[in-house]
Image (cartoon, rainbow, N blue to C red):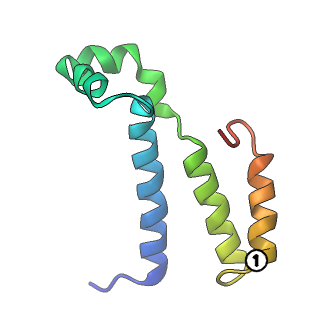
Amino acid sequence: MEIDLLDKFQGTLLGVAIGDTLGHPFEGKLRTEIHSCFKDFGDFIQENNHLFKTYTDDTQLTIHIAKAIIQGNGFNTQIFVKEYVNWLDDPPIGPG
């Protein structure tokens, strides 16, 4: 089975979004804090279920970079800057 470049591109974007969403609840926590969450992970999931439905500005920026690459058929400085500015104004998350 041959995987074409578009499939790889889409898979990469999906991987970024999934990893970002799953990692979001642990962002900024110390290793010891993260380990304590996994001692009783079932309770942690129930108490923080809403956190696993949220992607962050990392995914948002990745989407805007992907749009710039697609629009520019590769890297194009003007399009990249335009998409970066669009990201700055992209609700609900934006830079942070």
Q: Please tell me whether residue 71 is drawn above or below residue 53 in the rendered image.
A: below
Residue displayed at 73% across by 80% down: 76
**Of 36 and 22, which appears nearest the observer?**
36
Relative placement, left or right, of 95 versus 21 is right
Quarter holding residue 72: bottom right
Quarter the C terminus occupies = top right
Residue displayed at 41% across by 19% down: 48
**Of 33 and 67, which appears nearest the observer?**
33
Quarter holding residue 80: bottom right
Q: Residue 45: x percent and y percent?
A: 33, 21
Amino acid on which disc 1 is placed: Thr
Extreme residue in the left direction: 39
Q: Please tell me whether residue 21 is drawn above or below residue 12 in the rendered image.
A: above
Q: Residue 63: x percent and y percent?
A: 61, 58
Relative placement, left or right, of 50 versus 60 is left
**Of 30 and 39, which appears nearest the observer?**
30
Classify 10 Å Cα crowding around label 1: few (below 14), some (14-19), many (20 and above).
Answer: few
Quarter the N terminus occupies = bottom left
Q: Please tell me whether residue 45 is drawn above or below residue 57 in the rendered image.
A: above
Residue displayed at 53% across by 34% down: 54
Quarter holding residue 78: bottom right
Badge 1 element: helix
Q: Residue 31: x percent and y percent?
A: 28, 31
**Of 94 and 33, which appears nearest the observer?**
33
Q: Which residue is mark 1?
A: 77
Q: Residue 21: x percent and y percent?
A: 45, 40
